[in-house]
Image: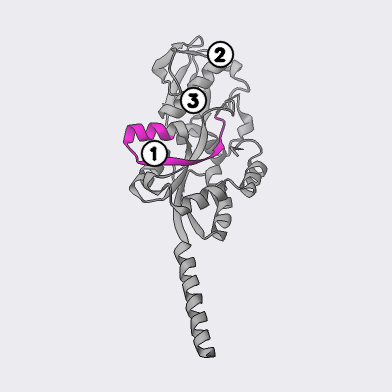
Amino acid sequence: MKTVLSILALAAGLALGGAAAAEAETIKIGVTPGPHAQILEAVKPLAAKKGLTIEIVEFSDYVVPNQALDSGDIQANSFQHKPYLDNQKTDRGFKIDSVAETVNFPIGVYSTKYKSFDEVPAGSTIAIPNDPTNGGRVLLLLQDRGVLKLKDGVGLKPTVADIADNPKKLKILEVDAAQTPRTLDDVAAAAINTNYATAAGIKPSDTILKENPKGPYVNVIAVRTADKDKPWVKTLVETYRSPEVKAFIETTFKGAVLPSW
């Protein structure tokens, strides 16, 4: 009798072990260097406790992470705001979707030559990101601060061609977002996304113009459309948007990165 019970107990244990193994999952998440990668490092141990192993893959630009996700090289990414994702889907036909809001990085204008934007001379060159959403975001910031005026009805993606009035005759230099920190020595000022600023050793508090943190530019976790209802997605979102990760963000970045929950 004991032998039979032992066999049954062993079988039950193996079944439970098999179920646990089946629930375990390993995913690759694409990020850009800096805060996005740091935050995912804080998410990893929390997700691991729930059976989800996260491998972080860093990308140096804003285009490849969506290509890699759409092609299945990674299972999720966390680096972009919703307007940028929507623009990428429209332009490139990616079948990927946002599954959760994460953090906001108020974009800022920095200078190694001037302590305020009012000091920037007429005719100076200002570097901005060359992608439609982040470049447009900077143009809207400049308009909001009275530096220039855009055409009516430009929405969230104005371009340099949409500048209707430029009293200081500023020259707008469009460069890859990841390269904007490198332009600082050559231009009067540069608009730099916070993740690239911190990665380059630039303090977000050193801006001479800063975007209002309340707006449409909250970052998101994106996954393939076919995967969005899978159990691991729920685990990823819950662990990312946890009190522990929120505390990590607030303590580590001191207002330069704002949690959305």
Q: Which residues are magenta?
A: 85-107
Residue located beneath label 2 in the image? 146
Which secondary structure lies at badge 1? loop
Numbered label attached to residue 63: 1
Q: Is residue 89 above or below residue 116?
A: below
| x then y, percent, for residue 185 | 52, 29
In this picture, is 106 found above or below 221? above
Q: Distance from label 2 to label 1 (Cα)?
A: 31 Å
**Residue situated in front as seen by the camera: 155 or 195:** 155
Q: Residue 88: within the magenta?
A: yes
Q: Is residue 138 above or below residue 63?
A: above
Question: Which residue: 48% across, 30% down?
Answer: 183
* Numbered tag placed on residue 137 in the rendering: 3
Residue visible at 51% across and 27% down in the picture: 191
Q: Position of residue 111 (x, y in %)?
A: 57, 26
Q: How many marks?
A: 3
- Rounded to the nearest whole Å, what is the CA distance between mark 1 and mark 3? 17 Å
**Mark 3 or mark 1, which is nearer the start of the sequence?**
1
Q: Residues within 10 Å of mark 2 (few under 14, many from 20)?
A: few
Residue 89 falls in which quadrant of the image? Answer: top left
Q: Residues within 10 Å of mark 3 (few under 14, many from 20)?
A: many
